[in-house]
Amino acid sequence: MVAIGFDVGGTNVRGVALERGSATPLATLRSKTEANGDVLVETIVEVTNGLMAQLRVVDDTVTLDAVGLGIAALMDANGIFRYAPNIPGVYDYPLVDRVIERLGVPVIADNDATTATWAEAKFGAGVGYEHMAFVALGTGIGTGFVLGGKLHRGAHGYAGESGHITIERGGPEHITGARGPWEYFASGNGLGMLARDWAANGRLDSAIELAGSVDAILGEHVNELVDARVPEVEPLIAEFSESVAVGMADLVYVLDPEIIVLGGGLVGLGEMLRSKVEAALAVRILGRNYRPEVPVMLAKLGPRAGAIGAGALAFDLT
Amino acid sequence: MVAIGFDVGGTNVRGVALERGSATPLATLRSKTEANGDVLVETIVEVTNGLMAQLRVVDDTVTLDAVGLGIAALMDANGIFRYAPNIPGVYDYPLVDRVIERLGVPVIADNDATTATWAEAKFGAGVGYEHMAFVALGTGIGTGFVLGGKLHRGAHGYAGESGHITIERGGPEHITGARGPWEYFASGNGLGMLARDWAANGRLDSAIELAGSVDAILGEHVNELVDARVPEVEPLIAEFSESVAVGMADLVYVLDPEIIVLGGGLVGLGEMLRSKVEAALAVRILGRNYRPEVPVMLAKLGPRAGAIGAGALAFDLT
């Protein structure tokens, strides 16, 4: 009675073997992502078989119940991999059907931010809340929503593409071609860009020391400065948090969540980021004397959330 | 077996008497809105009694089942009227409890855009769709959502305050104090402002002729120009539609609706507005080769939608 949950990103395919009702993997296995539909199916099959082989060393009666796929792609409600900016070469590929053909068990697929949302709702920071917004700050911004206790997928399975919302019309052009979207400013890439800008203006010398030059500064250097409690990094995080809060306020106005869970790679910035985002959000919300503040909480499940949530969703198929 | 639905705006209290499953009022009655909680309750009671008296002329056995209130206010999930920019003097008032005390029937209250959303979903342009976004362009912008066939109210009853979403950070200051919110540009007030700007720059002489001066131009003059098919108004509507589409695209990214229903006073601009908004929205959405276009439809129920939806929601209490 095991489900395998996957997180398929631009670089890695991560698989976790889970028991029902648990977020603690029995086994984990990682492989490379190949930008080809048939090869991707092969990788998923190999990782599944590898994980099951690991489990059978301990218990040779264990059976595979279902597979859940969290994919960094526009996944439609019929299990079709429509397209993914970071997995070029796979378009309109019937991923779910192909994996079902190979493994002979029920398979479900959703966007990886959607599956991570479900993991945090069921096992992480969102436990006990009926209305939750999950905001993952990584290379871009991924979001997902639990509304009335249920995962919100939307009419076609495309809900939660909130990184694209426009916060600065006529603003700078993002790699997507859009002008001034939220993720241009408030993602890990946005933080790196802001840090380089500050460094070029003499406001973040410690980052230049770490990285070697202004142009070499990345989000991870900011992470190091936060860990080292370098004083000049705090106002940088404050300015960055304002950008995070602009889009979060939009989500609060549209959806009215009880809490927002902050996930993705930037969670490593920890309490400094969380507290500043929460404060910036509270100040932005109109009528704030007449509505409760929305708490911002750090995600608890780390980088495996996408795979864990996919596995949890897979159990719902059985 | 009758429910009374109300739409309480800044100026008028409109009541409609409805039978279950019908959007066609048996009777309607209107009164003035007074910015005082106790007087507002009195008005609601008087309109209810007036409507029931009308019905009893025809059938003296008719009974009142329930009352639904659609209010242009932040209404919380406990029936408390928190506050309303256009009904000053009423704050944190237990409206639902007070109306129940007076009328002795079940009472429900929601924001008026929320109740209008339900009316359009159940009886209007949204019939047959499980995921719908309703966008009312009036003095401001009100929105509401049907997700998975259900009205989405949010954790506290405040969902759908989308007029406040930021589309131009650092942009012009709105009457709310926020900078660059969607409704600054894409509401009826936004259209009037845009028309005055065009007129001042010699691009809309026909509006100056109608209104008497640049400063006297209002949204309703634009309406007349559209009805008269004045050629110079079409590019104005096209530019305005771009602003409408920015916020709609944000809703599409967040929620993934099947359709968007365009309501509110600006629906009078008709097909010219609808088609331009739909086209501008389609162009904005990223990955549009991999996802269906979102149709934009005109609302069908007109200015009574808020009261009709409130009445329909009231029947759910019985």
Image (cartoon, coloured by chain):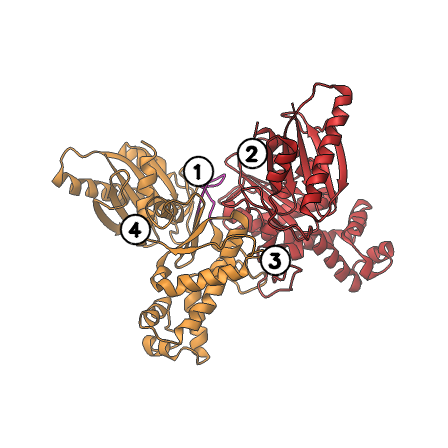
Chain colours: A red, B orange
Give the Cα distance between marks 4 and 3. 36 Å
Q: Residue furthest front?
A: A101
Q: Which mark is residue A129?
A: 2
Task: Report whether residue A3 is seen.
Answer: yes
Question: Residue B54: where, in percent of width, then height?
Answer: 16, 43
- What residue would you read off at disc 4? B304
Q: For marks 2 and 1, give the one nearer the viewer.
A: 2
Question: Residue A23: where, in percent of width, then height?
Answer: 67, 29
Left or right: where does residue A161 sit relative to residue B241? Answer: right
Q: Which mark is residue A181?
A: 3
User: The residue tagged with tag 3: helix, strand or loop?
Assistant: loop
Label 4 vs 1, first from the N-terminus: 1
Q: Residue A68: say if magenta.
A: no
Tell me where the magenta segment starts and ends, as one range: B145-160
Question: Residue A16: where, in percent of width, then height?
Answer: 71, 32
Graded by Cα atoms within 10 Å as few (under 14), some (14 to 19) or many (20 or more), the crowding at tag 1 reads some
Q: Residue B158: say if magenta.
A: yes
Question: Residue B188: where, in percent of width, then height?
Answer: 40, 63
Which chain is indicated by disc 3?
A: A
Left or right: where does residue A261 sit relative to residue B307? Answer: right
Labels 4 and 1 within one chain = yes
Q: For marks 4 and 1, give the one nearer the viewer.
A: 4
**Which residue corresponds to the image point at 60% horizontal and 44% vertical from the top-left?**
A94
**Which residue corresponds to the image point at 61% horizontal and 52% vertical from the top-left?**
A163
Q: Amino acid at mark 4?
A: Arg
Labels 4 and 3 within one chain = no
Which chain is indicated by disc 2?
A: A
Labels 2 and 1 within one chain = no
The quadrant holding residue A314 is top right
- What residue would you read off at disc 1? B77
Q: Are marks 2 and 1 in contact (CB under 8 Å)?
A: no
